[in-house]
Amino acid sequence: MNDITTLLQQLVAINSINPDLVASGAGEQEIAQFVANWLEQAGVEVTLDESVPGRPSVVGIVRGTGGGRSLLLNAHMDTVGTTGMERPHTPLVEGNRLYGRGAYDMKGGLAAIMIATAQAKKLSLRGDVILTAVADEEFTSLGTQAIVKQWHADAAIVTEPTALRLCVAHKGFVWLEITTQGKAAHGSRPDLGCDAIVKMGQVLMDLERLDHSLRAVPSHPLLGSGSLHASLIEGGQELSSYPERCILQVERRTIPGETPEQVETELRDLLGEIQRTDPTFFASVKTTVVRDPFEVAENALIVRTLSNQGEALLGSAPEIVGDTMWMDSALLAAAGIPTVVFGPGGAGAHAVVEWVDLKQVQQCSDILLATIQHFCA
């Protein structure tokens, strides 16, 4: 375990805070160069993919002799900010835990695929192994979005932290913006004004009812149901005026089978019902961001292969689970690549105290290597 611990310490020591989340964030330039150099020293063919200036992703390839299945391994290099952390980039090992920003989310998974890819170089494989260490997963996933336009594989494994469980589904989300229209007027002239913020009150109450109805009927065996919440609200001009406009930003979490069109129709219907009872109510809704949910069949070859190798090395088959958060796995699956999520455990994603289980990082890497050997043979 010493090699993988040393590698993980080196990765955590590099500031790779996403600059789209924190203006002073260092970004991926330094860590990408480190990953690229490390892979090259291991004899892996390396390409830097810089879809946005200063935001490189790393692609490392172990080419097979031909005729075998290809496998793509994916981990992101960027992290969130470090507010409140004492020494975020000074990795600390205590017992079986390594502490530091990104250790859990997800440099532990990155270290696991780097070690597995380097060891795959020593195997006589027929299929290719493609490592993708990507930029910007924590914001808009620019890295993986660029990768899927250039690279394809017969299957993929994303090593987000799962505590060595097999994640075969996760939720997506749709961000929407609802605007209620009022009429600006002096606060002393209620006969001339219409309060857009008050009009939004009925919307908020109906959104709560819609959320309750969604969660009352869970329909997915691993993910349950979709959900809905109001995230941000703004409106008005000044204290002495009737507000002309109120804007509410809403997040709708989705499960497989729910579409952005369906979500937007839900809200249009909701607004239409209010308007039928209030002729002075005028509102609009628009979708601003969509991230699709993810699902892969439990009997897909990559799921079965990873499960079998996990069982062989751990003594029991990894648990099949779904997750609530969105991951780059959805982009890979949308590109036609059967994908599963499997990574080490720990705690503290986006939190002040973050750590990864070093034993599980090693076990993850070992299981990945065994999966490579069987899948790409």
Image (cartoon, grey):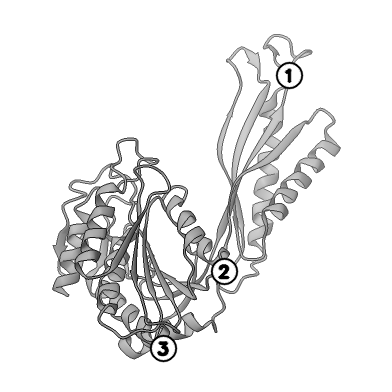
Q: Which one is in front in this view, the residue at disc 3 or the one at disc 1?
A: 3
Give the left or right position of residue 54, taking residue 202 as reference: left
Structural distance between the alpha carbons of marks 3 and 1: 64 Å
| Amino acid at pointer 1 | Lys
Q: Secondary structure at mark 3?
A: helix
Q: Is residue 309 at least partly visible in the picture? A: yes
Query: What x and y, as percent, mark residue 134?
Result: 38, 57
Structural distance between the alpha carbons of marks 2 and 1: 49 Å
- Asked whether the residues under the numbered discs 2 and 3 touch, taking CB atoms below 8 Å apart as contact, a structural biologist would say no
Using the image, determine if residue 19 lies above or below residue 35. Answer: above
Q: Which one is in front in this view, the residue at disc 2 or the one at disc 3?
A: 2
* Residue at mark 2: 336
Query: What x and y, as percent, mark residue 311?
Result: 37, 88
Earlier sequence position, callout 3 versus callout 1: 1
Give the left or right position of residue 28, taking residue 323 as reference: left
* Residue at mark 1: 183
Looking at the figure, which quarter contains the N terminus?
bottom left
| Amino acid at pointer 3 | Asn
* Residue at mark 3: 308
Looking at the rendered structure, the number of numbered marks drawn on it comes to: 3
| Amino acid at pointer 2 | Gly
What residue lies at 57% left-to-right and 33% top-to-bottom?
Answer: 233
Q: Which one is in front in this view, the residue at disc 2 or the one at disc 1?
A: 2
Q: Is residue 101 at least partly visible in the picture? A: no
Q: Farthest residue toward the front?
A: 65
Q: Secondary structure at mark 1?
A: loop
